[in-house]
Amino acid sequence: ALADRELMVVKQSGEVGIGTTTPSKKLEVEGAISASNGLYVEKIYSENPTGGEPSIKLSADHVVEIGDINGQTNEVILKVDNTNSKITTTAGHQVVIAGQTPAANMELTVAGDISASGFISTKSHITASGNISASGTVFTNEIDAPSGDITIDSAGDIILDADGTDIILKDGGTSFGRFKRDSSDFIIKSETN
């Protein structure tokens, strides 16, 4: 004879359990849930995920992973083919686009070109392995190219506005010259030894 096995439990307090006899929520399922026409919820919670695995993972190919992933805490990763991360946010509030890991001390790391139809503005500096393109104005304290050249190509004017201070030229972090305005005079000053 087959032993009796409880497949569903409805508690007197209203909790429903499928695959479990001790549901602690209104509906608790031990195992996978499949819905052919969508699953509608107001909030999603994940408790006690397996170490190194995402707390929440949506879709097999176009993936959103949230949680402790690859040893990093509280990451959010968006993928398109379940292998290449397109957007990653870290617990340190860093954002990585089309890359794997954020550059040191960078709030935004982009593996490729940056293009904007408007302004690009940052209170820190911009580092890119590709091109930076903007049809508007680029506001930044520093533009850094780890390798190669920086080319500024404009159909209009190229404006360097130091707001009353000097425009300093550096090589390897060492200042070798500057542009400055003294009253109505324009001065180019060399600082080489």
Image: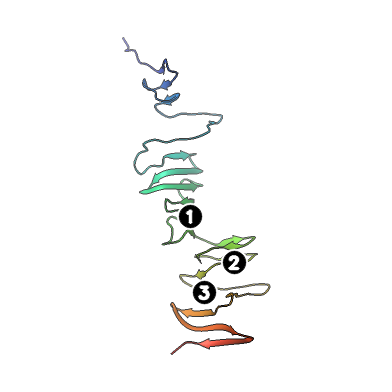
Q: Going from the N terminus, do you reach mark 2 or mark 3 first?
A: 2
Q: Closer to the N terminus: mark 1 or mark 2?
A: 1
The type of colouring in the image is: rainbow
Q: Earlier in the sequence, mark 1 or mark 3?
A: 1
Amino acid type for the residue under numbered disc 1: Val
Q: Position of residue 83 (x, y in %)?
A: 45, 48
In this view, the residue in front, 124 or 150, is: 124
Q: Is residue 115 left or right of residue 78?
A: right
Rendered residue at 58%/87% (across/down): 187
Q: CA distance from mark 1 to mark 3?
A: 25 Å
Asked if the residue at tag 2 contacts the one at tag 1, i.e. Cβ–Cβ closer than 8 Å, the answer is no
Q: Residue at x 57, y 83 (%)?
A: 180
Disc sitting over residue 138 in the figure: 2
Viewport quadrant of the N terminus:
top left
Locate residue 40: give its quadrant.
Answer: top right
Q: Nearer the viewer, mark 1 or mark 3?
A: 1
Which x, y percent locates residue 178? 53, 83
Which quadrant of the rendered structure holds the C terminus?
bottom left
Q: Amino acid at mark 2?
A: Val
Label 3 belongs to which residue?
A: 149
SS type, badge 3:
loop
In the depicted structure, whether residue 100 falls above or below residue 155: above
Q: CA distance from mark 1 to mark 2?
A: 19 Å
Q: Which residue is mark 1?
A: 95
Q: Nearer the viewer, mark 2 or mark 3?
A: 2
Report the Cα–Cα distance between label 2 and label 3: 18 Å
Residue type, label 3: Asp
Whether residue 5 is situated above or below residue 188 in the rendered picture:
above
- Residue 14 at x, y = what percent? 45, 18
The secondary element bearing badge 1 is classed as strand
